[in-house]
Image: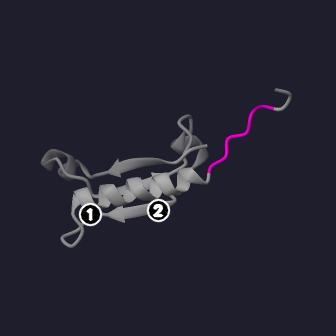
Amino acid sequence: MTYLVYGVSTPWQRRMGTMGSYIVSDKPSNWDEDEQGKWKPVAEFHVSQRHTMEEQQRRAHEYCDYMNSAVTIHPPIGT
């Protein structure tokens, strides 16, 4: 399980080429939101007038790197 950064935007923001927020999540790639429910983000960085899109993206990636530094991936049993 590793953490990833996802960009979240509304259709209007996508047309303008901007993001509304960046989230850090450990959501599995095969997770079905409709069937299994919504996966909660670990952290969310909102883009605003005070915090630019680039600044919030950098913060999200820094937090993601920090969270991934503590992840230990164990080998399968018996190897």
Disc 2 secondary structure class: strand
Q: Position of residue 55 (x, y in %)?
A: 26, 61
Residue 38 in view: no
Out of 9 and 26, give the one closest to the viewer: 26
> From this viewpoint, which residue is outermost toward the top?
79
Q: Residue at x 26, y 52 (%)?
A: 10
* Cβ atoms under marks 2 and 1 closer than 8 Å: no
Within the image, what quadrant is residue 21 found in?
Answer: bottom left
Please give the residue where the numbered disc 2 appears in the rendered image: 43
Q: Residue at x 23, y 68 (%)?
A: 48
> From this viewpoint, which residue is outermost toward the left?
16
Using residue 54 as the reference point, say whether residue 29 is left or right of it: right
Q: Main secondary structure of the magenta part?
A: loop
Using residue 56 as the reference point, say whether residue 23 is left or right of it: right
Q: Amino acid at mark 1?
A: Val
Indicate the quadrant containing the C terminus: top left, top right, bottom left or bottom right.
top right
Magenta-highlighted residues:
71-76
Which labelled disc corresponds to residue 47?
Answer: 1
Residue 7 in view: yes
